[in-house]
């Protein structure tokens, strides 16, 4: 299967009720052969309207970190656990995650990144481990199966609590260092 085919399957998906309230499926953007894959939680309003992940306020803040570090959105891949927006931006429910996660797994398999970066607690809980503690474990790198993974604060958390921005910068700098050291495309 190719990414485009997977995207078409996601666009037709009816495995959970979010397909009834969404405007667009937010499949993911970036390079099909990206070395770094960022994974967020779920689309918000602006993502739902455009079909592109991380384009709202949180996404614009995230872009500033990428730009500051010289990481291009076109060279990495950005996706979410859920492909459809939960109403009123509530947290993704576990049944919605269960329905949608096979698409993300296939997306990861097709892209085959060398580093997975979870954006926020919900993504880290689902992808790294079910007892992940974002406040104490953010910015640490772990090997899980064939993938190296890390997590940073969700950009929305930085908007709510700007004190977290220093930690975010340190973590993103570590990601850049890791990429440079291992020759990852940025
Ligand atoms: N928050 C997310 O987790 N993902 C998006 O795409 C936008 C906001």
Image (tube, helix red, strand yellow):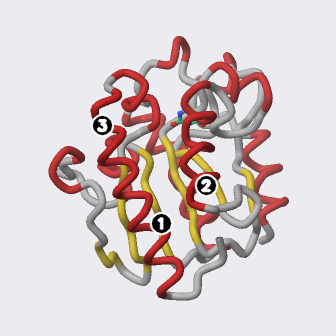
The disc label shown at residue 116, or none: 1
Mark 2 or mark 3: whose residue is earlier in sequence: 2
The span from disc 2 to disc 3 (Cα, nearest Å) is 31 Å
Quadrant of image for the N terminus: bottom right
Q: Nearer the viewer, residue 119 or 159?
A: 159
Query: Horizontally, is 126 left or right of 138 in the view?
Result: right
The span from disc 2 to disc 1 (Cα, nearest Å) is 16 Å
Looking at the image, is mark 2 or mark 3 nearer the viewer? 3
Q: Taking 165 as reference, is 105 above or below it? A: below
Task: Bin the neighbour count of mark 2 within 10 Å (Cα to Cα): few under 14, some 14-19, many 20 and up.
Answer: some
Q: State the image coordinates of residue 143 (x, y, percent, origin top left).
A: 32, 78
Q: Quadrant of ligand 1?
A: top right
Q: State the image coordinates of residue 117 (x, y, percent, origin top left).
A: 45, 60
Secondary element at tag 1: strand
Q: How many marks?
A: 3
Query: Horizontally, is 171 left or right of 108 in the view?
Result: left
Image-quadrant location for residue 103: bottom right
Who's the residue at 79% across and 29% down the image? 50
Q: Nearer the viewer, residue 69 or 46?
A: 69
Q: Are marks 2 and 1 in contact (CB under 8 Å)?
A: no
The residue tagged 3 is 164
Mark 3 or mark 1: whose residue is earlier in sequence: 1
The disc label shown at residue 32, or none: none
The span from disc 3 to disc 1 (Cα, nearest Å) is 21 Å
Task: Bin the neighbour count of mark 1 within 10 Å (Cα to Cα): few under 14, some 14-19, many 20 and up.
Answer: many
Who's the residue at 44% across and 67% down the image? 175
Secondary element at tag 2: helix
Q: Taking 83 as reference, is 68 above or below it? A: below
The residue tagged 2 is 103
């Amino acid at each position: 299967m190719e990414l485009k085919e997977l995207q078409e399957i996601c666009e037709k998906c009816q495995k959970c009720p979010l397909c009834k309230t969404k405007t667009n499926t937010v499949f993911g953007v970036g390079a099909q052969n990206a070395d770094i894959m960022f994974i967020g939680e779920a689309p918000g309003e602006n993502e739902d309207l455009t079909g592109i992940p991380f384009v709202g306020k949180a996404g614009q803040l995230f872009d500033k970190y990428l730009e500051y570090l010289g990481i291009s959105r076109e060279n990495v891949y950005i996706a979410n656990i859920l492909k459809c927006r939960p109403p009123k931006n509530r947290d993704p429910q576990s049944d919605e995650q269960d329905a949608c996660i096979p698409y993300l797994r296939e997306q990861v398999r097709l892209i085959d990144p060398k580093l997975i970066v979870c954006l926020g607690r919900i993504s880290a809980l689902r992808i790294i481990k079910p007892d992940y503690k974002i406040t104490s474990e953010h910015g640490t790198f772990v090997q899980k199966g064939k993938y190296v993974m890390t997590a940073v604060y969700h950009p929305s958390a930085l908007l709510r609590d700007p004190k977290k921005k220093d930690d975010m910068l340190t973590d993103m700098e570590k990601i850049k260092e890791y990429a440079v050291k291992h020759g990852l495309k940025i």
